[in-house]
């Protein structure tokens, strides 16, 4: 009885696995690969029917089977843009509303010259000569006398034509006489300070005569 118990205990406590079988179990099964083979069958039927019901086959009335002779070809159309070069010559630029452009003015410009523009021209040139210290003082006084006499003659012509009133001609003659007196003082001046003062006074009289001639 004791021997039987020892034998059973020995059987239960020694569950061993052979090392070779353990290695075989851990290795992958690489030798059991099945290769699937495909076969192609040749038949004499030119239009085989597919066993797949979802496969679409072209019908005789399909658009893809239209012959090239019956295929609708669209001909090339001419350009819809008409280029009329002759009409450009007759184009006229229209004015925008209210003449809102830079090269055309809405306010008319008065191009008429004043009546005494000739007298104004003489006196303006004389005033420029005074500003430049033209020549000597004696020569400047002589030029002033000539210009004043020419201005009086022109004023008399305008009065005879009825374009200028007598009072305007009298006023111009008075201012011109004062200018001549100042130029005479310039030629007689000795000191530089006195010369500059008389010269500025003569220029002021000349500008006053220009304003009188402009008011003709």
Image: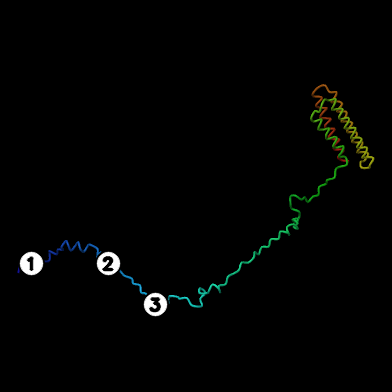
Pick the front one: 184 or 20: 20
Q: Residues within 10 Å of mark 3 (few under 14, many from 20)?
A: few
Q: Which residue is mark 1?
A: 7
Identify the image quadrant of residue 69: bottom right
Q: CA distance from mark 1 to mark 2?
A: 46 Å
Mark 1: secondary structure:
helix
Q: CA distance from mark 1 to mark 3?
A: 79 Å
Which one is earlier in the sequence, the residue at label 1 or at label 2? 1
User: Which percent across, then down, holds residue 25?
Assistant: 21, 64
Figure colour scheme: rainbow
Pick the front one: 83 or 139: 83
In the image, residue 67 sits, relative to residue 92, either above or below, namely below
Q: Residues within 10 Å of mark 1 (few under 14, many from 20)?
A: few
- In the image, which is nearer the foreground, mark 1 or mark 2? 2
- In the image, which is nearer the foreground, mark 1 or mark 3? 3
Q: Which residue is mark 3?
A: 44
Mark 2: secondary structure:
loop
Mark 3: secondary structure:
loop
In the image, residue 89 sits, relative to residue 134, either above or below, namely below
User: Which percent across, then down, holds residue 43?
Assistant: 38, 76
Q: CA distance from mark 3 to mark 2?
A: 36 Å
In the image, residue 110 sits, relative to residue 3, either above or below, namely above
> In the image, which disc is placed on residue 33?
2
User: Which percent across, then down, holds residue 28?
Assistant: 24, 63
Residues marked 3 and 2 touching at CB (< 8 Å): no
* Count of number-bearing discs: 3
Pick the front one: 15 or 62: 62
Which one is earlier in the sequence, the residue at label 1 or at label 3? 1
- In the image, which is nearer the foreground, mark 3 or mark 2? 3
Residue found 84% across the figure and 23% down from its top:
189
35 vs 66, left or right, is: left
């Amino acid at each position: 009885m004791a021997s039987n118990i020892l034998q059973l205990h020995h059987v239960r406590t020694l569950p061993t696995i052979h090392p070779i079988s353990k290695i075989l179990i851990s290795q992958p099964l690489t030798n059991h690969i099945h290769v699937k083979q495909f076969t192609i069958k040749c038949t004499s039927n030119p239009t085989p029917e597919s066993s797949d019901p979802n496969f679409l086959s072209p019908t005789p009335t399909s658009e893809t089977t239209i012959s090239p002779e019956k295929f609708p070809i669209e001909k090339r159309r001419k350009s819809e843009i008409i280029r009329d070069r002759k009409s450009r010559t007759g184009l006229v630029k229209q004015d925008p509303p209210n003449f809102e452009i830079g090269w055309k003015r809405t306010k008319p410009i008065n191009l008429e010259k004043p009546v005494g523009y000739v007298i104004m021209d003489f006196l303006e040139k004389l005033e420029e000569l005074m500003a430049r210290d033209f020549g000597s003082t004696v020569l400047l006084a002589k030029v002033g006398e000539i210009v004043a006499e020419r201005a009086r003659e022109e004023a008399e012509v305008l009065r005879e034509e009825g374009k200028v009133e007598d009072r305007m001609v009298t006023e111009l003659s008075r201012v011109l006489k004062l200018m001549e007196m100042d130029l005479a003082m310039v030629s007689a001046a000795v000191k530089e300070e006195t010369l500059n003062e008389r010269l500025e006074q003569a220029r002021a009289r000349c500008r006053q005569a220009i304003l009188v001639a402009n008011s003709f």
